[in-house]
Image (cartoon, grey):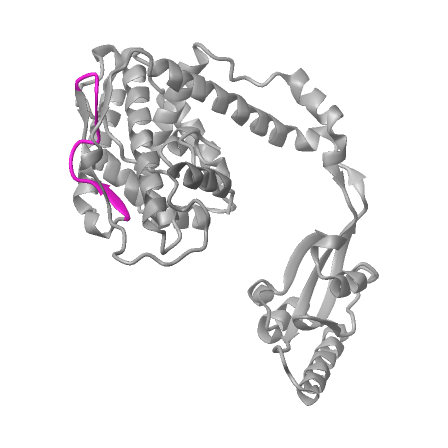
Amino acid sequence: MFSVKKRLFALAIVAALGGTVACNSSKSKPAADEGAATEEVAKTDGENVEAKASEIKVEELPFYAKGPVATVDGTEIPAERFNVIAERRSMQMPGNIPGPMLQVYKKQTADMVIDEFLIERAIEAEKIVATPEEVDKALSDFKARFPDESIYQSFLEHNRITEDVIRVDIGKDVALRKIIAKSHNIEVEEEKIKAFYEENKQRFEQPEEVEASHILIKIEEGADEATIAEKKKQAEAIAKEARASGADFAALARTKSEGPSADTGGALGFFPKNRMVPEFSEVAFKLKNGEVSDPVRTQFGFHVIKVTDRRDARLVPFEEVRPMLEEQMGNELIRNAMTQFLEELKKDVKIERHEDNLVVNAPAEQPALDMPGLDDPEALKLMLQGLGAEGSQGE
């Protein structure tokens, strides 16, 4: 699946789809000239958050809000917004998180809710709206990031959302980009993309690669010599069968391989020499296309390898990496613009946080972890940044 770091920018504000059902907490209606389509989106958005929040069992969340999260210029941000985001974040968290670390997650989530409120308020004040055509295109681009429709559907199922909900947040994303673009440059200049490529060509040097499949016969740690000999004999028989005229290597792998790639016919795709263990790569890179190896012993067992294609070492041309560079550099521009935009939104704004309404469901007994700074919130914050858990701006 595509990298989570490539998720929609607006969704990233509230942590991997956390704001996918967030509503306008002010309950204000969109301006009349925004059109019926925008009003319908706002209505659906509000209904979604209320319905979703009513389904959440807060006692099962790692942290939750039991009352308003904050008051911003006299307007309360309701607990429902926080709890929907908290549930989304909980799906991304590992188990057994210590109480002090949950305190950090809780504060991050409150920050996200406040940031989202300020952004929505600014978009409403500026009467910025995403057109249906813009939403359709953005949705199409979003879905194109998934290898196929089944994986996209699995994504929706895993996050317990529908495409209609995705469309609502895509509309927010488009509107957010529009309002940021009014005061910040978020367009990547072609000259800068080319300059980066020219100055960093070593990053785009691609080593020689081979495409291979394998069949693995496992050897358990501590196996005796008799067992190893029997496994080798088994692998030799498979190699002989794989070399026979008309043999289907993928079918053999599916039925006889004991490795995780068995389901895909043993396919490993293209890989450079240093990606595999030395014993495996040494043989794979000497095979000709279509050739099947004798059993190769590694720490995992005996491998029967078949090479199907190869690529010579090369410098990847600019046109191939240009889309990736444009996206990366664009994301960096947006991150910086977003940071500045939020700072501007918070100027002269009265924000009263209601910390007493935020509850952590920490276990009564925390596991003993020998981690310096575990009780220091700032140290924990740095740790979370290193793990990719910190920050309400997209990655």
Q: Is residue 322 above or below residue 85?
A: above
Horizontal placement of 219 versus 351: left or right? right
Q: Which of 248 and 354 lies nearest the eye of the viewer?
A: 354
Residue sitting at the far bottom: 226
Residue 93 spot, x, y in % from top left? 38, 49
The residue at 72%/81% (across/down) is 232
**Is residue 93 in view?**
yes
Does 66 lie within the magenta span?
yes
Residue 280 spot, x, y in % from top left? 74, 64
Does 92 lie within the magenta span?
no
Q: Is residue 155 above or below residue 196?
A: below
Residue 393 spot, x, y in % from top left? 43, 29
Q: Is residue 24 above or below residue 349?
A: below
Q: Which of 142 and 346 lies nearest the eye of the viewer?
A: 346
Q: Is residue 306 above or below residue 186?
A: below
Q: Which of 186 and 101 lies nearest the eye of the viewer?
A: 101
Horizontal placement of 341 versus 246: left or right? left
Q: Which residues are magenta?
A: 62-74
**Is residue 57 in view?**
no
Q: Quadrant of residue 163?
A: top left
Q: Quadrant of residue 170?
A: top left
Horizontal placement of 223 versus 62: left or right? right
